[in-house]
Image: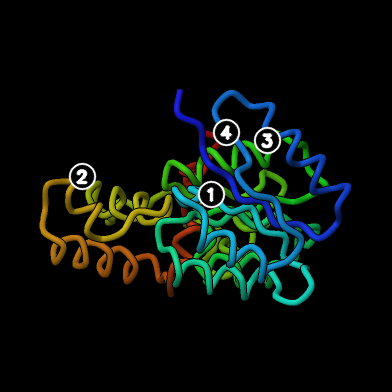
Amino acid sequence: MSRIRVLLAEDHDTVRQGLKLLIDAQPDMAVVADVSNGHLALERARTLVPSPEVAVLDIAMPELNGLMATRAMIELLPGVAIVALTRYSDDAYVQAMLAAGARGYVLKQSDPSELLHGIRAAAAGQTYLDSALTARVADAFVARHGRAERSRPPHITDREAEVLRLIAIGHSNKEIAGQLDISVKTVEVHKANAMRKLNLRGRIDIVRYAVLQGWLQDP
């Protein structure tokens, strides 16, 4: 079995070594580098051959924090999937990391299995939110859009819903077009129509809607 190559960035040595032991103990993943700050994470990501598939980044790191490191790493290596690992459960942090391009958001205080789920989902090109966050993410959506939208309204088509689902789990318009055997332009039309009908403003709202629909369950 080919192992998921993981780069781990965490500034607390004891925590980092514990995470490394946890990840290396899995038959389908291996830590290929572990570093203590965002600058080192970028340097190792740049020099590792082959490149890591997933980077697990603490948000609160010295020299270069996880948010800045995420933006820089995605620009440097677009193929690397980022999983944020943090003690911060605030919505602002979640939204900032997802907006920066992170595929996963996992809390340090959660069960270790959450991180493993997040790594596997990110490696598969999917989005993963810690299960402790999903209820609040859903509530934030409902608070703005109303409880009537907990289930998919009948006027959104199955194709529009499928496009939103694929966007929520992390696929690009081009990838969606290939999966559904339609043009990229058609994907864009379905996305725009669905977002207009559901009053969604952007990717964060799409992820929130996906949580309500159960599209971001454990892989």
Q: Amino acid at mark 4?
A: Met
Q: CA distance from mark 4 to mark 1?
A: 10 Å
Determine crowd level at label 2: few under 14, some 14-19, many 20+ residues with C-alpha closer than 10 A.
Answer: few
- Label 4 or label 1, whichever comes before in sequence order: 4
Residue drawn where x is 30% and y is 63% of the image? 194
Q: Amino acid at mark 3?
A: Ile
Residue drawn where x is 73% and y is 66% of the image? 37
Is there a contact, CB below 8 Å, between mark 3 and mark 4? yes
- Discs 2/1, front: 1
From the top left corner, tell me how far across and down residue 98 is, in percent: 55, 65
Determine crowd level at label 3: few under 14, some 14-19, many 20+ residues with C-alpha closer than 10 A.
Answer: many
Is there a contact, CB below 8 Å, between mark 4 and mark 1? yes
Q: CA distance from mark 3 to mark 1?
A: 12 Å
Relative to 60, is 148 above or below? above
Q: CA distance from mark 2 to mark 4?
A: 27 Å
Q: To which residue does mark 4 refer?
A: 29
Position of 197 with respect to 49 (left or right) is left
Pick the residue in front: 190 or 43.
Answer: 43
- Label 2 or label 1, whichever comes before in sequence order: 1
At numbered mark 3, what does the secondary structure look like: helix, strand or loop? Answer: helix
Q: CA distance from mark 2 to mark 1?
A: 23 Å
- Label 2 or label 4, whichever comes before in sequence order: 4
- Discs 2/4, front: 4
Is there a contact, CB below 8 Å, between mark 3 and mark 1? no
- Label 3 or label 4, whichever comes before in sequence order: 3
Q: To which residue does mark 3 refer?
A: 23
Q: CA distance from mark 3 to mark 2?
A: 31 Å
